[in-house]
Amino acid sequence: MYAIVDIETTGGFASGNGITEVAVVLHNGREEEGRYSTLINPRQPIPRHITALTGITNEMVADKPGFDEVAPHLFNLLSGRIFVAHNVNFDYSFIKSHLDSCGYDLQVKKLCTVRLARKIYPGHHSYSLGNLCRTLDIGINNRHRAEGDADATARLFSKMIRDDAEGHILKMTRGKNAEQFLPPNLPAEDLEALPYGPGVYYFENQKKEIIYVGKALNLRNRVRSHFSNNDGNRRKQELMRQVYHVRFRECSSELMALILESQEIRKHWPLFNRSQKKYHHRYGLYSYEDSKGYLQLVIEKKRNHLPALYTFNLLQEGHAFIRKLTGSTDLPGEAGYQRQELREPPAVYNARLNKAIDTLQAELPSFVLVEKDYYAEDRYAVYLLEKGCFYGMGNIHDPYNMPLLLGAWKEKIEPSPDNDYIRGLVYQFAEKKAFTRLSLNE
């Protein structure tokens, strides 16, 4: 019924590492039925720190079978049984990935003895195999070797079967229970608390530090999807190890969730977020005074510490902006916009250019986007832009009776961070039918 598994590997994730040892203890729920253990040649060097931890050297595995040679027997041992391990997602990711590469599709239920121990023996400071066995007076021989750890896990599992007065094992292996795929330290209650609507979710580590921020149209389904596919890449396995808590904030719509996600990523810079950390418009329009006192316009790669007059994602957008600004059909040169021969003093020319810049910026729109709130029928989500820049967002019960005055809306909405990505989102969603755009006056 159960296959209790432990492995030793060359590293922490399946996609780039090999298995050096595997042990399986077969258990029928009452007693051990048999066991299998072997060293495996990973066909790659074993790092020194792994040898220091496990004692397994390159010489020890040199004449041992490769995984492809043991795969048929291992697949037969595991098929039809519940895969049990201490931090099951780690062992299962390696075994499944390596069996897949040999043409064997392992599809079995999983049971994590870390998660099970948290249910049956709550309140322990640590649920590592060593600490848990020490606390429960279960001896471990040959620690950090597959057979030694599998034997200790089997004896721990036998004790948990005897102590499982509330039937946690049956509950955790019934159907598609979340306990089978969640990380070892993440409470299932965190997942059950998630709504089925839009919002932003936060993964936190043991110290309650935010390590990942994401957005979702359906919070519960999206968070489940992070853990339901047990792939063996480094980032996924590190996230599984480090996530201890999930919390969330409901948002009225997809757009609100996208904006909040962007703001939270830039506020917390979570370890596992990649997107948006480096997102910014690539080019900026800058002005400088040349040696003759004339203002020059130049389009350059955006500078972090120098405010741009305007920003663009594409160089062509900058060219078009300057043509509109100056009324010229000439493309700028490599150094920026090159003015034609000037017959007016610098002060006059500069004033005219600054006036053109001010006029164009003044023409940038101020408006509110309005859409229905997902969570409340009598409430609307609103997004305020002031002169082309994102001012803030919020929820209002009767937006269509509000005066179309910028100042009145600013009194209702808390200001929040703005960036190029958010402005792009608002303009993109403004074209959708679900949104009403209300133009505002000063």
Image (cartoon, rainbow, N blue to C red):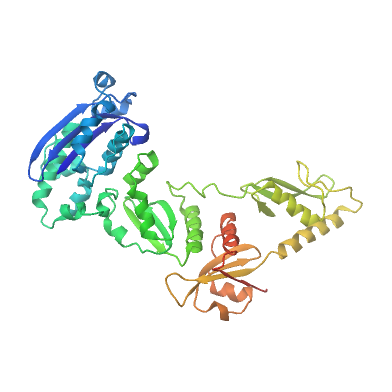
Residue 317 rendering spot, x and y as whole percentages: 70, 51
State which quadrant residue 105 falls in.
Answer: top left
**Residue positioned 72% across, 65% down in the render:** 363
Q: Is residue 359 left or right of residue 66?
A: right
Residue 290 rendering spot, x and y as whole percentages: 80, 46
Q: In this view, does 48 lie to the left or right of 308?
A: left
Please determine whether, in this image, residue 79 is positioned above or below residue 206.
above
**Residue 364 visible somewhere in the drawing:** yes
**Residue positioned 62% across, 69% down in the render:** 367
Residue 60 or residue 63, whichever sits in front: 63
Q: Specify the farthest residue to the right.
A: 343
Residue 302 or residue 147, whichever sits in front: 147
Can you say which quadrant of the picture contains the C terminus?
Answer: bottom right
Residue 284 rendering spot, x and y as whole percentages: 67, 49
Please determine whether, in this image, residue 412 is positioned above or below residue 51.
below
Residue 99 or residue 342, whichever sits in front: 99
**Residue positioned 17% across, 40% down in the render:** 3
Can you say which quadrant of the picture contains the N terminus?
Answer: top left
**Residue 208 visible somewhere in the drawing:** no
State which quadrant residue 142 falls in.
Answer: top left
For the image shown, how many numbered marks are present on the structure? 0
